[in-house]
Amino acid sequence: MQDQLAAQQPAENHRTIAWPLVLVYAVLIVFASLFPFEGWRTQGISPAEFLLARIPPPYWTWFDVLVNVAGYAPLGFLLSLGFWRHGWRRSGWLWALLLGGALSLAMEFLQIFLPQRVSSNMDWMLNSMGTLAGALLVPLFVWVGILRRWSDVRDRWFMPDSRGAIVLLLLWPLALLFPPPQPFGLGQVFDRLESWLVDILVNTAFEEWMPNFMQANEPLSPIGQLVVVMLGLLIPCWLAFSVMTHLTRRMVMVGLIVVVGIAVSALSSALSYGPAFAWDWLDHTARLGIALALALALLQVGLPRRYCVLLLLMGVMIDVNLLNQAPPSPYYATALQSWEQGRFIRFFGLGQWLGWLWPFAVIVYVLLLLGRVPRDVVARRRRQSAGQ
């Protein structure tokens, strides 16, 4: 039966964006659950001790309940969607529940060995409930017709083999949720990389080889800040242009990217400093950078894809270079401390690693895109080979 259902689906459906997103989201859950990855030791706690502990535990809040349910709901949805796209229409939600519950149980078990984390059977149950809730959304969306409409929109708006760019575009707002050092500035990781290498190479023969990423301690100039803000919005626009050709739809995508970027940045500021400071990041430089990015993006909606790809690659490299030449701002350090030590620690690994790695994932995607042979060229070569 499953084979028949799979055969009825178009071949393109098997190249769903669900599986890449499942992999990314599962890796980020591992980072968020096991951060800061240090202090591993046996604490004399057996797995049965936390599995059989009373529910609810002595210390819990409704915020913890919501976080644990909401954190695993996207994973359940993506798993169920991936199985559904491959024809597992009746059992996809069950496999999603089993895999999501197993991942949560593994994370809770490993947290036994981390002094800074607390294993909880209630967390496991809530994570499993979130996975189930997300998984059951897929048959609901199919019944309502949302998935069919999404497939139609994707076919109309994006080119074939565009799932890599779509995945990166969907992850961009999540990467902005963790407070960036500059508005829309992602990828400032060299200082943390330096600290990590120092810890590894100290008192070794390679200690003198240690590079100094932070030789320049001067903050970014106003021009540098302006360029970072402008490129931070242009990069997702160029990424979208690389898989879109329709001019009107490109213009709509530019507006959507700008609106989402501003809204998520305000939410990040509100979570970090309080609702009263939600718009403090939107100073004169940020407003000017947003206006320039919007104007340039609209002027470039007619550019061919190959030029958009080249602009994307150069823009990411310039943006990352500028960000990593300057130290984090004091406000960024304050926000960082609040996320590390406050109630957002469960989101810490998820958001921070996305903010660190998103630009480099774009670089990898562009390099793979430049090395890919277009489908029409492959088809023409096959026809020529067959003719010979």
Image (cartoon, rainbow, N blue to C red):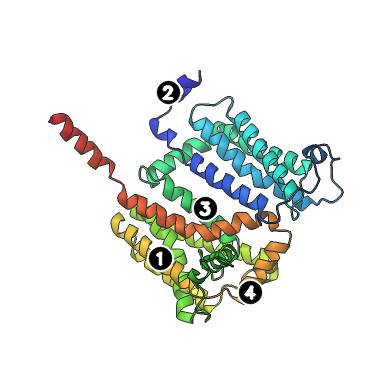
Labels 1 & 3 near each other (Cβ < 8 A): no
Residue sitting farthest toward the left: 388
According to the image, label 1 marks what residue? 317
Which is more toward the observer, 332 or 117?
Answer: 117
Q: Amino acid at mark 1?
A: Met
Q: Amino acid at mark 3?
A: Leu
Labels 4 & 1 near each other (Cβ < 8 A): no
Looking at the image, residue 73 sits to the left or right of residue 315; the answer is: right
- Image coordinates of residue 249 in percent, x first then y, are 39, 53
Q: Against 350, is 180 above or below?
A: below
According to the image, label 4 marks what residue? 331
Q: Amino acid at mark 2?
A: Ala
Which is more toward the observer, 133 or 350?
Answer: 350
Residue drawn at 66 percent across, 47 percent down: 71
The mark found on residue 171 in the picture is 3
Q: Earlier in the sequence, mark 1 or mark 3?
A: 3
Q: Secondary structure at mark 4?
A: helix
| Mark 1: few/some/many CA within 10 Å (<14, 14-19, 20+) | some
Q: Earlier in the sequence, mark 3 or mark 2?
A: 2
Residue drawn at 34 percent across, 57 percent down: 309
